[in-house]
């Protein structure tokens, strides 16, 4: 009798083990889902719109952005994205892609940069901003991040970004590192990359701008950072503010040598 | 005016695979805005694909189709150089047609 029971238990044990082997992990299922989406990434639509906006004469000065200097000389787009944020001597500031575009839209096209920065995401010129960053990032797809740390301001921004990343505050006593400071962690089904070091090709900083299937929205890095702060229950950081650019420098320098897959697609 | 579609059409054997990305809000008519008012339905209702001007596929779409929809289908007998045109029409009467060459 005893022997019989132990044999049947053993059989059940074997069955469970084989079922577990056959079952995919949640992460594998998400990967499969992403692969299925990859072919029809709607970021393509934003990319096309962004390219058009870059060449289109717009704004009070009726000018295009084709003379905009993204760091590699006026009008050079290819490869610019993977070197941003960087120091610009004309503005005497370290700027990320969005803040640099604000500068160009103001100086070349005559838009009011402060007004655009104050516009909520998904409205008016912010939609155009998103399309522009999608196209500009796509022009550097597959290239490796190579941020400069030569200028003293670039080093300062890295240090400031690092401090902001670890700064705990808010009603939940959260910091960026609460979620992104360890290996192999996740929130619900989402993998959380460890952003205190290089997370690898196409992960973290190298995966934005991205199209989010769940809400049908295209997000640039500024909006991604804004949402991180929302989730931490912090006040929203200013669009293209020094704080967000400093975080960009910290994340970008950490991703040194990793390939950008932007514009990516997220669940 | 609606933003352009992205159409890719690739011939393989005796058929061509067509992939279409459409730029559309596809508002279901079920959502409410910040003020609590229902956001009116606004979505594509009809889709038609033509091969060299001859209709090869028609579809009726509704509110359940996602924002910025992706559509993939095969066209029998299509070969490189053929023209594939896709047209959508939404419930507000707006329409858009884009064309691609099979490669």
Image (cartoon, coloured by chain):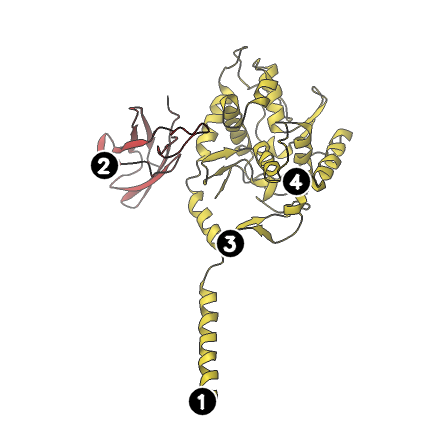
Task: Determine crowd level at label 4: few under 14, some 14-19, many 20+ residues with C-alpha closer than 10 A.
Answer: few
Cα distance between the residues tagged 1 and 4:
60 Å
Cα distance between the residues tagged 3 and 1:
43 Å
Decide which of A16, A193 is in the foreground and name it: A16
Q: Select label 2 or label 1 by which is in front.
A: 1
Q: What residue is disc 1 on?
A: A1
Mark 1 lies on a secondary structure that is: loop
Q: Select label 3 or label 4 by which is in front.
A: 4
What chain is the red one? Answer: B
Q: Quadrant of the N terminus of chain A?
A: bottom left
The numbered mark at residue B56 is 2
Q: Given the image, what chain letter belongs to the residue carrying mark 3?
A: A
Q: Are marks 3 and 1 in contact (CB under 8 Å)?
A: no
Percent across and percent down for residue A253 are 68, 39
Percent across and percent down for residue A163 are 74, 38
Report the residue that reaches farthest toward the top: A61
Cα distance between the residues tagged 2 and 3:
39 Å
């Amino acid at each position: 009798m005893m022997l019989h029971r132990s044999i049947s238990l053993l059989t059940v044990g074997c069955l469970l083990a084989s079922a577990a082997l056959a079952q995919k992990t949640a992460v594998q299922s998400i990967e499969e889902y992403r692969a299925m989406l990859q072919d029809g990434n709607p970021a393509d639509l934003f990319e096309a719109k962004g390219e058009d906006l870059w060449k289109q004469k717009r704004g009070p000065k009726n000018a295009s952005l084709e003379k905009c200097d993204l760091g590699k000389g006026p009008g050079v787009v290819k490869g610019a994205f993977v070197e941003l944020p960087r120091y610009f001597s004309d503005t005497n500031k370290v700027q990320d892609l969005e803040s640099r575009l604000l500068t160009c839209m103001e100086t070349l096209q005559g838009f009011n940069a402060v007004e655009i920065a104050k516009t909520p995401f998904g409205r008016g010129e912010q939609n155009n901003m998103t399309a522009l960053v999608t196209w500009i990032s796509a022009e550097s797809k597959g290239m490796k991040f190579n941020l400069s740390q030569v200028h003293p301001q670039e080093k300062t921004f890295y240090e400031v970004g690092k401090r902001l990343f670890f700064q705990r505050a808010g009603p939940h006593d959260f910091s960026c590192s609460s979620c992104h400071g360890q290996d192999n962690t996740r929130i619900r089904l989402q993998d959380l990359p460890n952003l205190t070091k290089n997370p690898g090709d196409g992960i973290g900083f190298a995966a934005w701008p991205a199209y989010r299937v769940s809400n049908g929205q295209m997000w640039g890095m500024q909006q991604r950072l804004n949402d991180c702060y929302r989730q931490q229950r912090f006040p929203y950081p200013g669009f293209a503010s020094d704080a967000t650019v400093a975080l960009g420098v910290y994340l970008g320098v950490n991703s040194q040598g990793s390939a950008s897959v932007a514009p990516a697609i997220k669940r | 005016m609606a933003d352009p579609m992205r159409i890719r059409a690739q011939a393989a054997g005796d058929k061509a695979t067509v992939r279409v990305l459409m730029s559309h809000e596809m508002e279901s008519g079920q959502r409410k805005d910040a003020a609590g008012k229902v956001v009116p339905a606004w979505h594509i209702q009809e889709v038609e694909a033509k091969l060299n001007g001859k209709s090869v596929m028609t579809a009726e779409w509704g509110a359940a189709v996602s924002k910025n929809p992706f559509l993939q289908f095969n066209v029998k007998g299509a070969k490189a150089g053929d023209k594939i045109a896709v047209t959508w029409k939404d419930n507000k009467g707006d329409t858009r047609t884009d064309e691609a060459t099979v490669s």
